[in-house]
Amino acid sequence: MKVAITGSSGLIGGALVKDLRGDGHEVLRLVRREPAKPDEGRWDPQGTVDTRALEGCDAVVHLAGAGIADRPWTDSYKQKIRDSRVRGTQVLAEAIAGLGGKPRVLVSGSAIGYYGDTGGREVDEEAPMGSGFLAELVRDWEAAASPAADAGVRVVHARTGIVLAREGGTLGKTLPLFKLGLGGKLGDGRQWVSWISITDHLAALRHLIDHDLAGPVNLTAPKPVTNATYTQAVGQALGRPTALTVPKFALRLALRELADEGPLISQRVLPRRLEASGFTFAHSDVDSAVSAAIR
């Protein structure tokens, strides 16, 4: 196949490029700067796409967007998060819709933030939209891909949970603290965490390209855990204590609004559509996923 990828410099995008090329597929990296290599094409998330580079692609995987948990949510940064996703997706979808030779599938990044705080209740893709900034963002983010779907392209929204990887994300950023014995649960630790190993996340993206799925698909492992259980799994894998607790007030002071839609939110999300399509997880329990990630 020939696969175009946005966000190829990120944690997931970079790993997906390597994974696809390792299996002999051709990868086109859509970059925001002037292309410097033969495998690069230019795109501007706020306006233009080099459609000549996209011609002949079998699939497009759209992973670009400003980091949601990279910094506190000021009004200006929330606008940056929104513009990078909603406008960027619309620009790409419109470019795909106008191609003579369209890709057969657009796998567009999304998030389980759509469901809001689910408490202890299990939810799948049939669950209604929750409330809050992230839920509204995901609603508009997914709707922005409509031009591609209206043009006959199969569009999949990859609603992703917390990706466990040593190189980055939640686990990668906190590993130094855990290694020092300073890891601990967040608040009371009872909030549910819906996670997926990076190995399974890459395999799931490949699965979405190859299988006849459309619409929202949850990319989470089948066994969500509480924050306390996740914290214990990381500590055990490293052989370090995890007796500390980060108080809720400290998280809110440091992260502001992000705290209540990020580390303190409870999301118990199940990958019903992914499993029903025949996908098999390499890491269905958090202990094996954490251990594999930090090796």
Image (cartoon, rainbow, N blue to C red):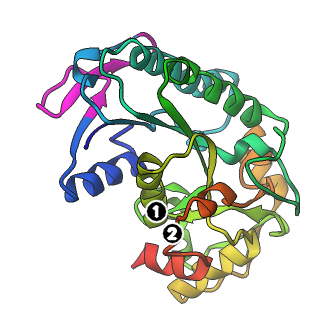
Q: Where's residue 6, x and y in %?
A: 37, 34
- Identity of the residue drawn at 66% across and 59% down: 271
Q: Is residue 148 above or below residue 276?
A: above
264 with respect to 281 (left or right): right
Any magenta on residue 35? yes
The residue that appears at 69% across and 59% down in the rendered structure is: 272
* Region in magenta: 29-47
Between discs 1 and 2, the one toward the N terminus: 2
Residue plotted at (55% across, 45% down) = 213
Q: In the displayed structure, does residue 236 sit left or right of residue 9?
A: right
**In the rendered image of this protein, does residue 82 appear above or below residue 258?**
above
- Can residue 45 be seen in this snapshot? no
Quadrant assignment, res 187? bottom right
> Where residue 210 sits in the image (x, y, percent)?
41, 50
* Residue 102 in sight here: yes
From the image, which quarter does the N terminus lie in? top left
User: Judging from the image, what secondary structure is the residue with disc 1 in?
Assistant: helix
Q: Which mark is residue 132?
A: none
Query: Which label sits in the foreground, 1 or 2?
Result: 1
Residue type at mark 2: give it: Leu
Mark 1: few, some, or many residues within 10 Å (few <14, many ≥20)? many
In front: 208, or 193? 208
> Is 171 left or right of 34, judged from the image as shown?
right
Q: Is residue 140 above or below residue 220?
A: above
Q: Which residue is mark 1?
A: 198
How packed is label 2: few (under 14 Cα within 10 Å), some, or many (20 or more)? Answer: many
The picture places residue 28, in percent across and down from the top left corner, at 24, 35
Q: Nearer the viewer, residue 181 or 169?
A: 169
In this figure, what is the number of numbered marks?
2
Q: Residue at x 81, y 38 (%)?
A: 129
Label 2: which secondary element = helix
- Identify the disc placed on residue 175: 2
